Image: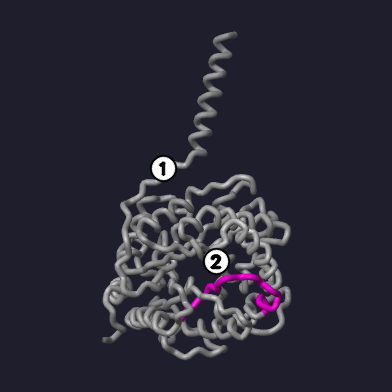
Amino acid sequence: MKWISASALLLLIIGVGQLWMQRVPPPLHLPPQQHVATLHPTVGVHTRLSGLGDSALIEQTLTQVREMGATTIVDLFPWAYVQPRSPYAYDWYGSDLVIEQAQRQGLAVIARLDFVPAWAHPANTNDRYLDHEHYADYARYVAAFAARYTPRGVRYLQIWNEPNLRFEWGDRAPDPVAYADLLKEVYPAVKAVAPDAQITLAGLSPGGPSGPIDPQTLSVNDLQYLQAVIDAGAPFDAVAVHAYGGQQPAQAAPSPDTVNFRRTELIRELLLRNGRDVPLVITEGGWNDHPRWTGAVTPPERVQYTVDAYAWAEEHWPWLKATCLWQFRLPSRAYSYVDNYTFVSDDGRPKAIYYAVQAWARRDQRPGQ
């Protein structure tokens, strides 16, 4: 009987030990501190690193970002990854891995925060579906993120992504008033623990139809949506912009009925008309050079337009804090036009656009000089 009790105790100890080991994150292996060598500090890129869990790949990617001359990255830090099972525990390992590696490379991080855990949305909905019942839970997550990472230099917290699209709003009609309500929940929760955090209005899908919103609406015009969010009294400190160039050069003049890089100026003008003189950050944008996609440009055009865009933003937009174009590298090949937004192929090889941006970032001259 005593032998059985001792065996049971031993099994209990082993089981508890294994459970404890599973819950204790492995130590981070970080490279020596680096600094970005660049003459153009607003250059940035959107990365796709969260959820990889591969420290070596993350370090390799962020080393390439630094060596290209970019100073800032945007990455997604999904709520669903940090609180996958309940609102009562946090798993910060994946976020720590990306943010600590970025800091060691001398890179600033803009954090996009969305993706709803399964416990916070109904079973028949997707991970973009967030209703008022769980706004407070999401706000607590953002506040916890801000408390942890704002002291480490992560200042811009982008709340959601393209909520003017049905897909990104949980397969529901976009609702600017509901999004404004979300910001009203998040803003005071974050400021209570991290006053320096910059609550950043989500980047909106550019363009889209204007008019009444009904249950079947797929997308809402970005300018209409932004105005409605402001009219609803949403609090925010900054605004993210998705500045895709389409098939037009970076310098092409903006127009309400055109999607191009300088549509960013229309966002800025709308904010000023409403008394919101806040900074902007481009968190997505750029050009595509897929040979069989109707929205693409040629590879030489993509290179030129991209370098021109970085230069235009730096020279003409003092209110823009960073130009982070989509996207640096995919974790795996998509075998579609999506592959042709990247600066580096999925196997890590830099493309021509990478070398062009690198060459420009390290010399103080405009394209063509």
| Residue at image point 56% right, 61% down | 113
Residue at the spot 58% in from the left edge and 84% down from the top edge: 272
Query: Against 102, is 201 above or below?
Result: below
- 280 vs 354, left or right, is right
Residue 277 magenta-highlighted: no
Residue lying farthest top? 1
Identity of the amino acid at label 2?
Gln
Q: Residue at x 54, y 14 (%)?
A: 6
Q: Quadrant of residue 336?
A: bottom left
First along the sequence among labels 1 and 2: 1
Measuring from the top left, give residue 315's x and y in whole percent.
39, 83
Viewer-nearest of labels 1 and 2?
A: 2
Q: Is residue 35 left or right of residue 276?
A: left
Q: Secondary structure at mark 1?
A: loop
In whole angstroms, how far apart are the C-alphas of marks 1 and 2?
A: 30 Å
Q: Disc 1 marks which amino acid?
A: Pro
Q: Which residues are magenta?
A: 228-245
Find residue 292 and report its horizontal and vertical position in percent. 41, 78
Residue 343 appears in view: yes
Q: Which residue is mark 1?
A: 27
* Residue 337 visible, this angle: no
| In the depicted structure, whether residue 111 falls above or below residue 319 | above
